[in-house]
Structures are given as C-alpha cells and as structure tokens.
Amino acid sequence: MMRSFVDVVLKLEKTSRRHRYYRGLLNLTLLFLLFYTLLLYVSAPVIFARYSSYDFTLLEYPVRMKLLCTAAAAFIPAIVIASLLYIRRKPVSVIRSIGDAYPLLNERLPTAYDNADSAGIVVDDLADGVAIDTGSVRRSAIISKKGIIFRAAASLVLVSLLMFVSSPDAPRFMTPEELESMITPPTDEELEEAADEAHQQQLMSELGSESGSGSGDAEIYGKPSVAVIEGTNIELVMFSDAGVGHSSRRTESEPISFISGTVYAATPVSSETYIDRLPEENRDLIKQYFMEMAEVG
C-alpha cells in the first residue's frame, strides 16, 4: 500500500516535469520569435527570393518560400540554444524543495521516503508523522509559475513586435535594395555606369571648388550636360560628349567696344486694313501684286 506522503511527492514531481517542459517550449518560442524578428529587420527574406518560384498553397493559404526559408533559418539556432538550456538545467528535486519550504520536513521527509517500503514501529511512526505534515504542503510554495508567466508575456510582446516589423512601412536596419546590392555581384555595365557617374561627380566637385575661388559667386544651373554659369574669373570645364551649345556671361572691368552693323532700309508691307479700304474692283489685283512681291523677295 502506497503511503500518502509518497503520493504527494509523486504528484509534485509530475507537475514539476510538466512545468519544465513548458518552460523549454516557451524558451524555444521566445528564441524563434526573436531570431525571426531580427531577420525581418535586416531584410533577410531578400536572400531567399530566388526560391519564389517554389511558392505553393496550403489549405487555401499562399505559402511564400522566402518567408518559409527565413523561418527555418530562425528556427535552427533557436532549437539548438533551447535544447542546450533544457539539458543544462537539471530537474528540480521535489523532496529538497519541500524541505527548503518546510524546515520541519527537511530531514524527516527524505528518510521516510527512502524507507517507504520498509515496515517497523519506528518507520511507521515516522511515516505517519510525515504524512500528517505533508498534508499542509502547498503546490505553489514548491513549484513557481512566475517563469512560465514571464515567458508567455514576453512571447506576446515579441509577437506584437513581429507584426510591426512585418509591415512594409516598418523601419529596417538595411533596406531590401541595399541587401540585394550586397549579395548580388554587379554586372560589367553597372560597374561602368558607376565609374562614369563617379568621374562626373569628381569633375563637378573640381568645377565647383575652382569656380568658388574666384572674386565673384558662381552658380551652376541644370544638369551637368547643360549648364548656365554666372560669376567672375570662372574656368569652365566641359565634359566629353556633353552635347553642343552653352551660354556664359562674364563681368569684365574693362569696357567692351561694339561695332555697328549695316543699316538696311525698311520695306513697307501692306496691312490687311489698307487692303480692305481699297475699291473692290482693285482689291484682288493689289493683293496678288503684294503676294508676288513677297515670293520674289
């Protein structure tokens, strides 16, 4: 026949194992949510975008392979760390915990538990006394639920953070375009375009520094291929293949002399009002005369 205090110890050990399992499961959930949130924050799904052709539908819900691969990448380190924590933390001795919480049972309970299968006057008297004292043992004093409650609350916080990071407008440590440019090697054309752009930027900076050293203020308007420059003592550098046509204005201290051009005589041109005033019988003839004169001229 099982003694009553043995039944109390076995029930507490079962509850302790269950709580240990729950803590391990919550640790795994916390680590997975943490790693998955961090991967989304750094735009890690871009790395697995090449597998988008393998997207499928599960129970009428679309499953995107890049998100599934990201979840797998977060789950692998999470399960490794959670397993190490679970193995490292040994199961709690219920008998020792009862003795710490109830000093009256500190020595009596282990002795009575070790001799539970024995019979005798002393053993029976000890077992009866321990059975009476273990009747007042409370489960909450031996097994704490604070760790489980804390992990559950932290999981809810991480779920909320994950939903925020999953939104397209959420801030990112690295944008998808930046990460894609890092993992995707640039082509020869892109390298050539980048080199040309860097060369043009260098010429623009040199032009700005040289024009700024003059006696006047210099400003450049428009794109590099077409520029209008104002200022004094400006050295203008034109880009190769920049196109044709530019205008510049320079303020000189010396007066500029101009040469008068040839003055041509003005040619009178008949207006429509003058023609309207002519007699109708001569109007068509005069109009034809002016049109022929215009063609000849």
Image (tube, rainbow, N blue to C red):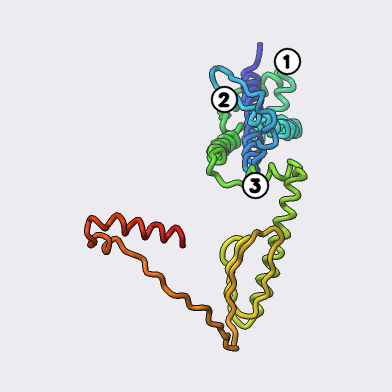
Labels 2, 3: front one: 3
Residue extending farthest to the top is: 1
Q: Quadrant of residue 218?
A: bottom right
Percent across and percent down for residue 261 are 53, 79
Looking at the rendered structure, the kind of residue marked 2 is: Gly
Looking at the rendered structure, the kind of residue marked 3 is: Met
Mark 2 to mark 1: distance in Å? 20 Å
Residue 180 vertical position relative to residue 262 in the rendered view, above or below: above
Which residue is at 75% across, 31% downward? 87
Q: Which residue is mark 2?
A: 135
Q: Which residue is mark 1?
A: 117
Which residue is at 54% across, 18% downward? 60
Q: Quadrant of residue 286?
A: bottom left
Q: First in sequence: mark 2 or mark 1?
A: 1
Percent across and percent down for residue 150 are 57, 38
Q: Which residue is mark 3?
A: 174
Mark 2 to mark 3: distance in Å? 60 Å
Judge by depth and name the residue closer to the eye, 160 or 156.
160
